[in-house]
Amino acid sequence: MLTPEEKKFLEENGYVNLGVLLSDSELELVNARMEALKEIEGENAGQELVASKYIRHPKEEGADRLADLVNKGEVFDVFYTHPKVLAGVASVLGSAFKLSSLNYRAAKPGMGHQKLHVDWGNSVVNNNYKVCNSIWLLDEFTQENGSTRIVPKSHKFNLLPDQALENPFAEHPDEIRITGPAGSVFIFNSHVWHGGTTNHTQADRRSIHSYFCTREQPQQINQAQYITKKTAQRIGKKGRYILDV
């Protein structure tokens, strides 16, 4: 599903743009469901993240969070089963991977800036990568609305941002922004240095992250603990394998 050029770019730079994978009608349905969930869950939104011992910062001031989207509507199935996304994850992690979590993040106006970080606690030796993320753009990502920043090729560094940088919150001279139209999807090796930026617009900047790990690693959200009978029946054998349930 990935071209040789896409695979090479991902391997060398730590990220790749897969293009627009969601139609306008799919985006409309997803965004409508997100708004409904925020209304339903209210102050309890993202509580599954708080319950997980494998998420270092479950609550983030300046961003709306929703979690365990696997069990919150058929409209979310595509986010962890799309064949092109799975091909991208496999090119980073190999064939033995599983979904770790499926979450929503929306940077609020005037907020959303994060320090450069990785999603794994240690630097990587010999390209033995453990985690890979995909970010689905529910809004257009621009330079102004809090788009994700990435330092290309930093997944090959031997140091973590906190070790190498005097101020991980500051702009890095080599960082680029993930920008593109709504419906686009980017794969990035989660060992690459990355972080959100400040949303300088008057509207939320919305995204969904389908985050994967190698099969021996613990999931951020224990899918077997949360899986519902309805979801398990709907997604079939392939989906259950991806969730490891």
Image: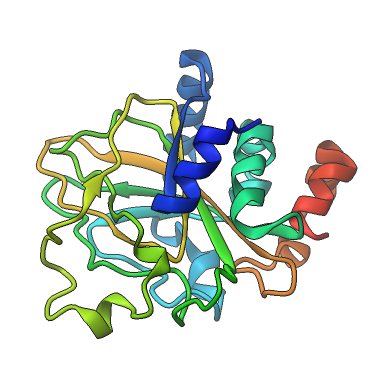
Above or below for 35 versus 102: above
User: On the rendered structure, is 13 left or right of 230?
Assistant: left
Residue visible at 55% across and 65% down in the picture: 48
The answer to whether one can see residue 84 in this image is: yes
Residue visible at 27% across and 39% down in the picture: 205
User: On the rendered structure, is 169 left or right of 241?
Assistant: left
Q: Position of residue 203 (x, y in %)?
A: 19, 35
Residue visible at 85% across and 49% down in the picture: 229
Query: Which of these two is toward me, 124 or 149?
Result: 124
Q: How many marks?
A: 0
In this picture the colour scheme is rainbow
Q: Position of residue 178 (x, y in %)?
A: 30, 41
Q: Position of residue 128 (x, y in %)?
A: 59, 71
Query: Which of these two is toward me, 67 or 183?
Result: 183
Quarter of the image where one finds residue 4 = top right
The answer to whether one can see residue 100 in this image is: no
Q: Which quadrant, please, contains the C terminus?
A: bottom right
Q: Position of residue 198 (x, y in %)?
A: 15, 51
Quarter of the image where one finds residue 234 = top right
Above or below for 168 versus 89: below
Residue visible at 51% across and 23% down in the picture: 22
Q: Which quadrant, please, contains the N terminus?
A: top right
User: On the rendered structure, is 183 left or right of 170?
Assistant: right
